[in-house]
Amino acid sequence: MTSEAPRWAKHLPWIDGCAALSAGVLVLVLREVFVHTHGLTRGLLTVIGAVNLAYAIPGLTLGSLEKRPSWLLWLLVGANLAWAVVCVVLVLWVSSSARWLGLGHIVGEGVLVTVLAALEVRYARVILGEGEGAPATSPGAA
């Protein structure tokens, strides 16, 4: 196994931000359909869409900066992990009323943001422009 980061690793903030932006827009645009197909309330779908739009901001901002501050990367990682926890809570909360598509949607978002957070931690140094070596492992490491 090599310690060299894949070429796409430096683009993780863009990937993360675009995924969140896409999910937010998709949920908000299709929420009336999702109310019926997912078995989730309009209010909950609105919150899910809005949260996705909100946490797209750190990823898109970080991706667009030439000099990337470490605090913004750790904010993005923290937002992803916080959303993953919220997704677990949501699944438990709506499990008796949601359809399998709704549960799958929430679980899928939780899994995706967890994987993104793990990759951002793993390739933090590359994202921050510090080289191809081992990842930064804490907010103070950069």
Image: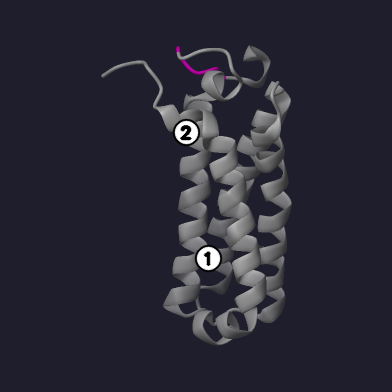
Residue name at image x 67 percent, y 49 percent: 56
Note whether 26 is above or below 22 in the view shown.
below
Classify mark 1: helix, strand or loop: helix
Residue name at image x 50 percent, y 44 percent: 114
- Quadrant into which the C terminus falls: top right
**What span is colored magenta in the figure?**
133-137
Q: Is residue 57 left or right of residue 105?
A: right
Residue name at image x 30 percent, y 17 percent: 2
Give the x, y percent position of residue 40.
59, 78
Residue name at image x 63 percent, y 78 percent: 31
Q: Quadrant of residue 26?
A: bottom right
Q: Earlier in the sequence, mark 2 or mark 1?
A: 1
> How has the structure been colored for display?
one colour
Which residue is disc 1 drawn over? 91
Which residue is disc 2 drawn over? 119
Front residue of 82 and 89: 82
Amino acid identity at mark 2: Leu
Front residue of 74 and 98: 74
Give the x, y percent position of residue 109.
51, 57
Amino acid identity at mark 1: Val
Pointer 1 local density, CA inside 10 Å: few below 14, some 14–19, many at least 20: some
Instruction: Look at the image and say whether residue 46 sits in the magenta stretch.
Output: no
